[in-house]
Image: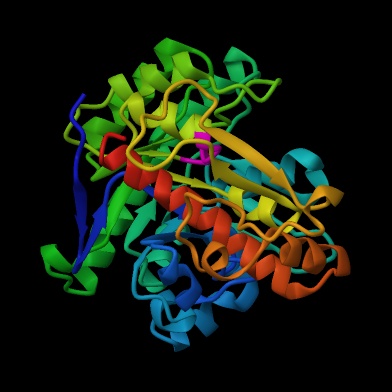
Amino acid sequence: MIKHEFLNIRDKTLKLPAFLPDATSGYVRAVDSQDLESVNIQALVMNTFHLMQKPGSSTIQAFNGLHRFANWSGVIVTDSGGFQAYSLIHQSDQFGTLSDRGIIFRPEGKNRKFTLSPEKSVQLQVSYDSDVVICLDDCTHVDASREEQELSVARTLDWAARCKKEYLHQMDQRQVDNDKRPLIFGVIQGGGYPDLRKKCAEGLLEIGFDGFGYGGWPLDSKGNLLEDMVSLTRNLVPEEFPMHALGIGHPLNLKRTYELGYEIFDCALPTRDARHGRLMRYTVPPGTALSGNNWLEYVYMQDKKHIKDSRPISEYCDCPVCSHYSLGYLHHLFKTGDWLYQRLATLHNLRFMTQLTERLRNND
């Protein structure tokens, strides 16, 4: 499997592999853009489903897009919002409906209805000045019936064709030069059925996209990576196309998925874990192969053993936190509930993730 060193997007270069923290509503909780740059974050994933509600599309457009609004000069990938709408509607049909035309949803506690069609999703993402536009897809659970998966694939292919048509219309209408256009990715659905994954991948390749994403929940009911299906989906796509492992970001899963040929990853887990007191660290120094699963261990900030510990979180980490603060101080911040803890912990876990992609890039 070819390992690409970088991906050119407009005037930006994304070094691969790359981990993208979830900046769902235009920000990564507890940190700002300068913080993100300090721990080598190159790109962010933002979400159309949430952004169209808050702050609202007219606000983002008033700033000429998300880069200026969030003061972020790196790459911005905008998720279509399909997974979030699916999750909301599957809680209860009172929150909305999903049909061949698109998605109509009403968030809990709100009277207003929102419409998210393939065309609307692309229009919004382009107006947000996204660097990578992701097609609206019909997301399913891996355990859904074959009938549901067949409908999902048919709908995903129909929506992808409509997204691509609208994307080309937007590029033509806005007179965007080819080297200035955002990339557009299709999402491969099919659940746990190899033939449906193949059908979806072949249909998307025929439509034509710049890259592809693994669609659907990538874990089984026990939280284990669906390695066979993740691998199959990668092998259905020619090597020259980049693949985004949507929602995959546990360090062990990221490493394995990279070995299977994926190069772009995003997940809320590292930042969520940080805020709740679970920090990551390496058991082996840089330059040492990350073999097996024992290279990763967790530090739990509520443990009393950290009260008087003057050491950093990790001796192998070069983040601003490990360079300046002790475990004892972080334990104190965590126990007192100070917001500074969330910022420092988030910075550390994000640097762990960018160190991981750097080590994979360097074949450590």
Q: Is residue 250 magenta?
A: yes
Left/right of residue 162 with respect to residue 142 in the rendered view: left
**Residue lying at 53% horizontally and 61% vertically, measured from the top left:** 48
Q: Is residue 177 visible?
A: yes
Look at the picture and state if 166 lies above or below 285: below
Which residue appears farthest toward the bottom when viewing the image?
62
The one of 62 and 19 positioned closer to us in this rendering: 19
Look at the picture and state if 174 lies above or below 289: below
**Residue lying at 61% horizontally and 77% vertically, measured from the top left:** 55
Quadrant including the N terminus: top left
Q: Give the image location of residue 168, x and y in percent.
A: 23, 57
Q: Is residue 125 magenta?
A: no
**Residue lying at 12% horizontally and 63% vertically, measured from the top left:** 178
Left/right of residue 38 with respect to residue 279 in the rendered view: left
Bounds of the magenta span?
246-251
Q: Give the image location of residue 87, x and y in percent.
A: 69, 43
**Residue lying at 75% horizontally and 62% vertically, measured from the top left:** 328
* Predominant secondary structure, magenta span: loop
The one of 94 and 126 positioned closer to us in this rendering: 126
The one of 245 and 348 positioned closer to us in this rendering: 348
Q: Give the image location of residue 254, x and y in percent.
A: 46, 35
Q: Is residue 21 visible?
A: no
